[in-house]
Image (tube, helix red, strand yellow):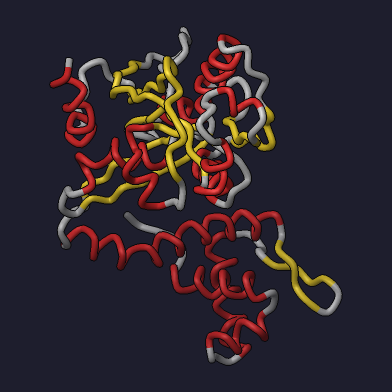
């Protein structure tokens, strides 16, 4: 490949543009002002367009200069990345897994779901949290390998997605020792008078909890609603209120938070799904995530 300009000249121009003037660029490059100016003029000559023009006491980019700067930014950014790319190419390759995590999915459950792959040598795990719709969009664009959610993917004629059941867990009520003691033995009727922390409205778990309250003619005293399950548990552990949590993560919950189990939320179950773009999963780590569910089936 031949070029009509010198990349060294382009680099000097790039520094001039970044520094806002030839004098500052010369100081940064530890070169004479005349040398830097001559290099930029050589670039302009080879391209056939003026890249800089006088403006007051300084210089500004012309339209051609702005276009040249945009290209130079990309060129020299690639150059800065080159040593890392080369080092990564000759080192032990990482096994990459990009996982989307639906907000509201219990973080302790997420950790448990990912346990089958965490011990993978040279694993590079990328976790992205967000709303289900946004995550599914990233999945369709192949920015994610899999999405973990508390519900299957909704029907969408524009997206070909497959939901794989990972399992389910019952729910129980937890709180600090003081709140559990205050609740006494009158469970679950005590939940009508105790302060409660709940997931946000219209989430799958919240809808099941609302139905659970309705079936028992309980009117809960909700003092906090949270989109993030870890935040809900943090406030629950501070004593703000009684809160629901997956019994699947009971041991981890007690180990990480200073709380106790008040009682079961009978009949309420939380389900977990892995959503992907393939009916027959190809990614080896995703296959490993699905294996426990496949064996149970």
Residue occupying the point 71% across, 63% down: 61
Query: Is 27 placed above or below 85 here?
Result: below
Instruction: Report the residue at 36% width, 32% height from top.
Output: 247
Where residue 105 appears, as percent x and y from the top left, is 45, 33
221 vs 59, nearest the viewer = 221
Instruction: Work out whether residue 241 can be spotted.
Output: yes
**In which quadrant is the N terminus drawn?**
bottom left
Q: Quadrant of residue 289?
A: top left
Q: Is residue 102 visible?
A: no
Horizontally, residue 296 falls left or right of residue 157, namely left
Could you tell me residue 6's position as x and y percent?
44, 68
Q: Is residue 10 left or right of residue 53?
A: left
In this orientation, which residue lies closer to the viewer: 25 or 48? 25
Q: Is residue 26 above or below residue 149?
A: below
Q: The C terminus appears in which quarter of the rendering?
A: top left
Where in the figure is residue 52, as x and y percent of width and height?
A: 70, 67
**Could you say which is closer to the camera, residue 32 or residue 278?**
278
Residue 71, compared with residue 87, is above or below; it is above
Count of residue discs: 0
Please identify the residue farthest to the front as the structure is shown.
185
Q: Is residue 198 left or right of residue 121?
A: right
The residue at the point 50 percent across, 27 percent down is 132
Q: Name above or below for residue 229 compared with residue 132.
A: below
Residue at horizontal 65 percent and vertical 60 percent from the top: 65
Using the rendered view, name the quadrant where residue 67 is placed.
bottom right
Pinpoint residue 71: horizontal percent, then vertical percent: 53, 55
Which corner quadrant of the image does residue 23 belong to? bottom right
Furthest residue in direction right, as rendered: 56
């Amino acid at each position: 490949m031949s070029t009509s300009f010198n990349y060294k000249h382009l680099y000097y121009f790039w520094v001039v543009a970044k520094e806002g003037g030839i004098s500052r660029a010369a100081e940064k490059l530890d070169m004479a002002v005349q040398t830097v100016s001559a290099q930029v003029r050589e670039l302009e000559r080879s391209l056939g367009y003026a890249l800089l023009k006088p403006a007051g006491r300084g210089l500004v980019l012309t339209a051609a200069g702005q276009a040249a700067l945009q290209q130079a930014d990309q060129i020299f950014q690639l150059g800065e990345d080159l040593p890392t790319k080369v080092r990564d190419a000759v080192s032990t390759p990482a096994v990459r897994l990009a996982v989307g995590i639906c907000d509201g999915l219990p973080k302790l459950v997420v950790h448990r779901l990912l346990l089958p792959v965490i011990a993978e040598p040279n694993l590079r795990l990328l976790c992205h949290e967000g709303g289900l719709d946004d995550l599914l969009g990233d999945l369709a664009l192949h920015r994610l390998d899999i999405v973990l959610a508390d519900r299957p993917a909704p029907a969408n004629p524009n997206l070909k997605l497959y939901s794989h059941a990972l399992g389910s867990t019952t729910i129980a009520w937890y709180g600090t020792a003081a709140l559990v003691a205050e609740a006494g033995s009158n469970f679950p009727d005590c939940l009508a008078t105790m302060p409660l922390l709940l997931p946000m409205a219209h989430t799958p778990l919240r809808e099941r909890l609302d139905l659970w309250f309705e079936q028992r003619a309980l009117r809960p005293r909700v003092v906090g609603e949270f989109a993030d399950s870890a935040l809900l548990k943090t406030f629950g552990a501070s004593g703000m209120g009684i809160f629901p949590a997956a019994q699947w993560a009971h041991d981890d919950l007690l180990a990480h938070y200073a709380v106790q189990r008040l009682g079961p939320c009978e009949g309420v179950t939380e389900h977990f799904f892995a959503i992907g773009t393939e009916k027959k999963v190809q990614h080896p780590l995703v296959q490993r995530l699905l294996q426990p569910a496949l064996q149970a089936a």
